[in-house]
């Protein structure tokens, strides 16, 4: 009986670890090619604002972080840097700086979703019509599937 319990326990742990690894690795394996440095520089030339993603935010950790220069303009939000890989990342503009899940949830109704973050080294997210970046001051990357704060940067 003890062997059966040990067998079931070890296999359940292995299955859970495999599932977690799959959730983590699938976005990396299916991500489109990241934009080149030249493409990000070109897209960010029209940006009116700049900010910086930093790894040392209160809500960031080993699996949830971003670093680099983010540029916000009327046509796009760009990142020259990287974010921790993960599933279902969304980019928001928020009316105030946040650095934890609870802080973002508290102001989420006043934030606007710009689009999906599909690459983890550099990105260009087109700005939808009708959004004025001057109405906000912070860029937030949020994992919709797990309700996880990834990173944020004040840009004005």
Image: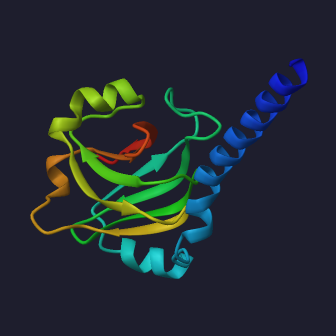
> In the picture, residue 126 is in which quadrant?
bottom left
Residue nearer the viewer, 44 or 84: 84
How many numbered discs, if any?
Answer: 0
Q: Position of residue 17 (x, y in %)?
A: 71, 41
Q: Is residue 137 above or below residue 100?
A: below
**96 left or right, relative to 26:** left
Q: Position of residue 118 (x, y in %)?
A: 46, 65
> In the picture, residue 34 is in which quadrant?
bottom right
Q: Is residue 136 above or below residue 122?
A: above
Which residue is depicted at the point 48% across and 56% down? 69
Q: Position of residue 60 (x, y in %)?
A: 54, 34
Quadrant in which the N terminus appears: top right
**34 left or right, relative to 101:** right
Name of the residue lying farthest toward the left: 130
Q: Position of residue 59 (x, y in %)?
A: 49, 29
Q: How is the image coloured?
A: rainbow
Which residue is depicted at the point 84% across and 26% down? 4
Name of the residue lying farthest toward the front: 1
> In the picture, residue 36 is in which quadrant?
bottom right
**58 left or right, relative to 115:** right
Which residue is depicted at the point 46% across and 67% down? 123
Which residue is depicted at the point 52% across and 75% down? 32
Residue nearer the viewer, 79 or 125: 125
Name of the residue lying farthest toward the top: 2
Q: Is residue 115 above or below residue 110?
A: below
């Amino acid at each position: 009986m003890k062997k059966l319990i040990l067998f079931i326990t070890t296999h359940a742990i292995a299955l859970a670890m495999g599932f977690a690894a799959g959730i983590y690795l699938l976005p990396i394996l299916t991500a489109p090619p990241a934009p080149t440095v030249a493409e990000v520089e070109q897209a960010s030339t029209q940006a009116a604002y700049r900010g910086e993603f930093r790894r040392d935010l209160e809500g960031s950790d080993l699996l949830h972080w971003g670093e680099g220069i983010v540029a916000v303009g009327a046509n796009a939000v760009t990142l020259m840097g990287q974010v921790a890989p993960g599933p279902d990342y969304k980019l928001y503009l928020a009316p105030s700086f946040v650095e934890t899940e609870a802080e973002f949830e508290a102001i989420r109704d006043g934030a606007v979703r710009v689009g999906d973050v599909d690459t983890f080294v550099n990105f260009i997210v087109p700005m939808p019509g009708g959004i004025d970046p001057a109405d906000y001051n912070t860029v937030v990357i949020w994992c919709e599937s797990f309700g996880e704060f990834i990173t944020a940067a004040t840009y004005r």
